[in-house]
């Protein structure tokens, strides 16, 4: 009987230890050390080359071609935007998201489209049967002759089918269910995820096959498995959204071939995920004008300006400690804005419960939305409405001053395109170019000036 040994591996940073720690000595995270059992007499062959893949040879830098090749353009503009213009041949993309958010639905739809335009696509599923995938495809109305389904979790068998079909696109759903027989650990553990991802990366780089991996997420919202998984891949995408809302946001948090923080907007329908070509208009479609506590913020997601409605409600608290409940905005930014309004401008928010919500399920994280949140809170506090044709942008400092924001021209053009007549912006000494015609700029130096212009006390 082969001897076994036990080790503990951190799922966050990959630190290995012969004994268990409640707190990882390397990254400082709690409850991330998981137990792995392996046979000591059968060491893992970490550097084994995948079947059918030739080893590379050193090349002089001057001899290496800088031509990146043509991208595979998907006829879904929102998907192309997030990837930086299309799929790069030989790239490896990791897609994460909460269970049931639509990861498999999105990739199945993209697979069927690509199978009609670029060639053979191999969709490997380790969690669903071929019949289940077929039922979803029928429900979505997808048909593609060159889309092949494979229900397999053994990486060696997957490589055999890749060598036989030679697909242009390989999709593995999911990386946590895939395993290699060279390791004795169970699928989903750190060593298996790291080894399988490394071999799929070698496959993509040496053959030119574009690989998409689906990754599970933890309860904190991070992709499960070792952190090195996100370093191995070229692009990391997250599919986000409120399960009670129809909108889904495909966000790029890492992209070696394009801009990060790009966002593609989709809507979940009975026929799958449909792209939303004008997200700002969709987010404002159900806006109720002339309602206290409602403002329009101009935020940037990557290179795209988005106009979103921010609603705030202040209410006298019956408890000793007032509540601060954000939905779609950062809790720390909400605390900062409420503290500035209380300390600098006399709003007695210490005795008010504050609720802030971003309509449409969008998460706004940039500080440029601070002023819109502050005006919404003051509007609810004073029970006065903000004019419906006003959009707001500005970052708040601790003294109540407003700081300049980036890409102001793009924000203003988006506001003018949607019919807004006035925009409140921080006063700047720089000359603003490429401003849209017919748009009135209300330049203010502080939050107090903005409140006097939009929700005066008298």
Image (cartoon, grey):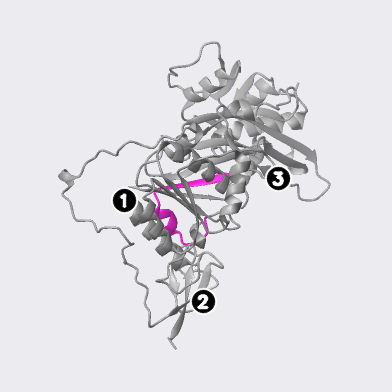
Camera-side residue of 179 and 128: 128
Earlier sequence position, callout 3 versus callout 2: 2
Q: Secondary structure at mark 2?
A: loop
Residue occupying image coordinates x 56% and y 35%: 265
Instruction: Kindly indicate the quadrant of the structure image that contains residue 73.
Output: top left
The C terminus is located in which quarter? top right
Tag in front: 1 or 2: 1
Residue 187 on image: x %, y %:
50, 67
Earlier sequence position, callout 1 versus callout 2: 2
Residue occupying image coordinates x 42% and y 70%: 181
Label 2 crowd bin: few (<14), some (14–19), many (20+), radius 10 Å: some
Label drawn at residue 20:
2
Residue tagged by mark 1?
207
Label 1 crowd bin: few (<14), some (14–19), many (20+), radius 10 Å: some
The N terminus is located in which quarter? bottom left
Tag in front: 3 or 2: 2
Asked if residue 29 lies in the magenta stretch, the reply is no
* Above/below status of 383 relative to 170: above
Residue 134 on image: x %, y %:
58, 48
Instruction: Kindly indicate the quadrant of the structure image that contains residue 334.
Output: top right
Asked if residue 239 lies in the magenta stretch, the reply is yes
Q: Is residue 380 left or right of residue 303?
A: right
Marks 3 and 2, how far apart at CA: 37 Å
Label drawn at residue 325:
3
Camera-side residue of 222 and 395: 222
Magenta stretch bounds:
223-240
Residue 131 on image: x %, y %:
59, 53
Label 3 crowd bin: few (<14), some (14–19), many (20+), radius 10 Å: some
Farthest front residue in view: 145
Q: Secondary structure at mark 3?
A: strand
Label drawn at residue 271:
none
């Amino acid at each position: 009987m082969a001897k076994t040994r036990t080790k503990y591996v951190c799922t966050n940073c990959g630190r290995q230890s012969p004994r268990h720690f409640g707190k990882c000595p390397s990254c400082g995270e709690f409850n991330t050390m998981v137990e792995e059992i392996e046979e000591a007499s059968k060491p893992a062959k970490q550097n084994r080359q995948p079947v059918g893949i030739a080893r590379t040879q050193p090349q002089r830098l001057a001899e290496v071609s800088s031509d990146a090749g043509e991208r595979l353009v998907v006829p879904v503009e929102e998907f192309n935007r997030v990837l930086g213009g299309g799929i790069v041949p030989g790239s490896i993309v990791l897609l994460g998201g909460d269970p049931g958010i639509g990861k498999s639905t999105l990739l199945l739809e993209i697979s069927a489209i690509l199978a009609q335009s670029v060639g053979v696509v191999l969709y490997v599923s380790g969690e669903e049967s071929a019949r289940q995938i077929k039922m979803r495809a029928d429900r979505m109305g997808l048909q593609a002759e060159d889309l092949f389904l494979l229900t397999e979790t053994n990486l060696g068998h997957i490589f055999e089918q890749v060598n036989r079909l030679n697909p242009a696109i390989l999709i593995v759903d999911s990386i946590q269910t895939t395993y290699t027989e060279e390791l004795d650990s169970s699928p989903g553990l750190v060593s298996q995820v790291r080894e399988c991802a490394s071999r799929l990366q070698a496959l993509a780089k040496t053959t030119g096959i574009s690989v998409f991996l689906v990754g599970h997420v933890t309860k904190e919202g991070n992709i499960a498995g070792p952190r090195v998984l996100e370093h191995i891949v070229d692009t990391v995408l997250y599919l986000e959204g409120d399960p009670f809302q129809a909108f889904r946001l495909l966000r790029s948090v890492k992209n070696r071939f394009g801009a990060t923080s790009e966002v593609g907007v989709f809507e979940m329908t009975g026929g799958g995920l449909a792209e939303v070509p004008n997200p700002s208009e969709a987010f404002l479609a159900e806006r109720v004008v002339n309602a206290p506590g409602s403002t329009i913020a101009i935020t940037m997601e990557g290179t795209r300006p988005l106009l979103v409605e921010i609603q705030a409600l202040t209410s006298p608290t019956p408890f000793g400690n007032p509540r601060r409940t954000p939905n779609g905005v950062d809790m720390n930014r909400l605390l900062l804005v409420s503290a500035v309004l209380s300390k600098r401008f006399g709003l007695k928010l210490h005795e008010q419960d504050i609720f802030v919500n971003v309509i449409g399920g969008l998460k706004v994280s940039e500080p440029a939305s601070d002023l819109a949140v502050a005006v919404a809170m003051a509007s609810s506090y004073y029970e006065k409405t903000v004019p419906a044709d006003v959009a707001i942008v500005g970052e708040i400092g601790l003294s109540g001053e407003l700081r300049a924001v980036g890409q102001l021209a793009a924000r203003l053009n988006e506001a003018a395109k949607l019919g807004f007549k006035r925009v409140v912006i921080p006063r700047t000494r720089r000359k603003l170019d490429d401003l849209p015609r017919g748009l009135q700029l209300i330049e203010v130096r502080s939050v107090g000036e903005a409140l006097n212009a939009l929700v005066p006390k008298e």
